[in-house]
Amino acid sequence: DQQVKQNSPSLSVQEGRISILNCDYTNSMFDYFLWYKKYPAEGPTFLISISSIKDKNEDGRFTVFLNKSAKHLSLHIVPSQPGDSAVYFCAAAGATNKLIFGTGTLLAVQP
Amino acid sequence: GAVVSQHPSWVICKSGTSVKIECRSLDFQATTMFWYRQFPKQSLMLMATSNEGSKATYEQGVEKDKFLINHASLTLSTLTVTSAHPEDSSFYICSARDGWGVTDTQYFGPGTRLTVL
């Protein structure tokens, strides 16, 4: 039972344009959401997070949006850069403090 | 940012042998360490959570006698895959957190690729 889903396994975007990565979840008890970025042969690195009391959090080129009623969050990267090419995982957590990860989306930013 | 190392980065072993993977937090003390495994094109699946000096808490379906976890100090946790079989071949990733809450950042190691022949 996949509680956190990333339905797009891959996404290709032109440099300078916006990248939008999507994530859906099924457990309404999740109250904290994170995005991680992963390069090949490396562990995931934390990117940005959002609490369920907010609907938007911004950090430089990265913005995460949360729509609790739709159980959906998205990560916007603007402008996209070739160095952003990586696998992006969304993760969710609730009262257990454990992170539940999605399957990842491979982002390719074309120069 | 904080650094978590794993050793070895890859290992090939024969079926029936045991393999130990180390996870170290290099510049901070980890209140909690986590072990994940990842199959190709799948998400990171939490195997167990360990706190320094206490027994690990395993997720449902994870055999604690097969995947031995020792959290000997605030900077070191080890995962031993005992009597490894080909189906244990996977990518194992540890993470460490300096704090008790989910809002405390988890820092991930680079992972260990285990191949059991």
Image (cartoon, helix red, strand yellow):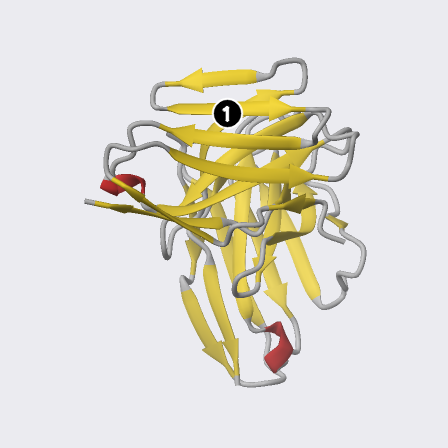
- For the residue carrying disc 1, how many other residues have a C-alpha within 10 Å: few (<14), some (14-19), or many (20+)? many
| Three-letter residue code for mark 1 | Val
Instruction: Name the residue at the left extreme.
Output: A111
* B11 up-or-down from B13: above or below: above
Relative image position of residue B92 (x, y in whole percent): 54, 59
As rendered, which of A65 and B34 lies closer to the eye?
A: A65
Q: Please give the residue where the numbered disc 1 appears in the rendered image.
A: A64
In this rendering, position of residue A85 left or right of residue A46: left
Secondary structure at badge 1 equals strand
Total number of numbered discs in the rendering: 1
- The quadrant in which residue B27 appears is top left
Q: Residue at x 42, y 62 (%)?
A: B8
As rendered, which of A84 and B47 lies closer to the eye?
A: A84
Relative image position of residue A95 (x, y in whole percent): 77, 29
Instruction: Name the residue at the top extreme.
Output: A53
In this rendering, position of residue A1 left or right of residue B114: right
Q: Residue at x 60, y 42 (%)?
A: B33
As rendered, which of B31 and B60 lies closer to the eye?
A: B60
* B12 up-or-down from A1: above or below: below
Tell me which chain the residue with mark 1 is part of: A
Relative image position of residue B24 (x, y in whole percent): 47, 45
Q: Residue at x 40, y 38 (%)?
A: B3
Q: Residue at x 76, y 66 (%)?
A: B65
Quadrant location of the N terminus of chain B in the rendered image:
top left
- Residue B55 in view, yes or no: yes
